[in-house]
Image: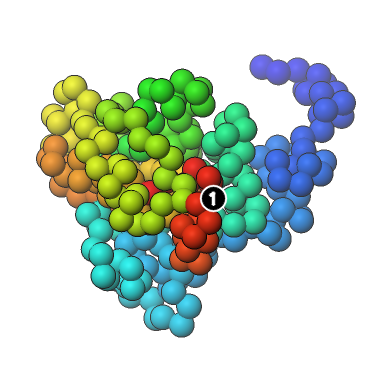
Amino acid sequence: MPDPLLTRLADTLFPPLCPVSGAELDRLHTLSPAAWSDLALITSDSRCTACGRELPGARPAPDLRCDHCTRSPRPWQRGAAAMRYEGSGRQLVLALKRGDRLDLAPLIARWMWRAAPALVAEADLIVPVPLHWRRLLARRANQSAELARALARQAGRRDAYAPRLLRRIRHTPSQGGRDAAARAANVAAAFAPAAGAAARLAGRRVLLVDDVMTTGATLAACAETCLAAGASRIDVLVSALVSFEGRAYLSATGTEDDTNG
């Protein structure tokens, strides 16, 4: 057990800092008031049940869909997200993905769990979107796997965490700057079940976990792979959603934001 005196001394000499603003904090795994005020958590009951986007003015319904999910049906059943990909949320996701801040995964996963407790509770398998081995080597960690691991631990579902059921068999360029059609083409045939995974996927309810959803192309490719392997249904849960305005910005400027499908 850690020595309480040494712990207090360490906290005094090296106080925890807000991962967004850099301000000193009185405890770990939280944000400063300024960062909290810039965090766009998704809390509305009026959300698309397929992707989780807020639909202002719409009445909550069991099968409420946004225009995009109505025009282009998803290969999964339900989807949810913890926050919008902007402000403090965007900074946190990028720090987790590119800044080796794996310590942020439990904080973000806690918001994801609160956003969709039913999706987590009903899943037989919690499966992160995989990275190709070349990208995993460069980043040293799969941020989606870290989020899925923290989510399963916090929800008491460690037995459901299945990080090796899917493989990324094709090294694809970044999705940044691509429109919906180009993103879908970029990840076509990029995923496959791992050896022996079909037996575990057969008849199971799968919760796919990723860090960011832009158009949903990457998650759709993973969902189709799981369904082809025999999964009975797929739900998806992400930490952040890129807004429709943000999608237009990324597509128009070609910004290398490394957002997923």
The residue depicted at 63 percent of the width and 47 percent of the height is 91
The single residue placed furthest to the front in the displayed view is 253
**Can you see residue 68?**
yes
Neighbours of disc 1 within 10 Å: few (<14), some (14-19), many (20+): some
Estimate the x, y position of residue 10 in percent, counting from the top left: 82, 23
Q: Where is residue 129 in the image (x, y as percent from the top left)?
A: 36, 38
Residue 242: x and y in percent read: 49, 58
Q: In this view, does 192 lie to the left or right of 111?
A: left
Q: Is residue 205 visible?
A: no
Please give left or right for residue 125 compared with residue 98 in the image: left
Most foreground residue, 152 or 174: 174
In this image, 228 relative to 261: left or right? left
Which quadrant would residue 97 be assigned to in this image? top right
Which residue lies at the image location 50% right of the left edge and 52% below the top edge?
254
Q: How many marks?
A: 1
SS of the residue at dot 1? loop
On the picture, is 91 further left or further right than 80? right
Quadrant position of residue 18? top right
Q: Looking at the image, which residue is at 26% across and 70% down?
A: 71
Residue matched to label 1: 255
Q: Which amino acid does label 1 sit on?
A: Thr
Q: Residue at x 82, y 33 (%)?
A: 15
107, above or below 62, in the image:
above
State which quarter of the image contains the N terminus: top right
Residue nearer the viewer, 223 or 246: 246
| Scheme of image coloration | rainbow
Q: Relative to the observer, which residue lies in front, 121 or 98?
A: 98
Q: How far across and how far down the image is residue 258, in percent? A: 49, 43
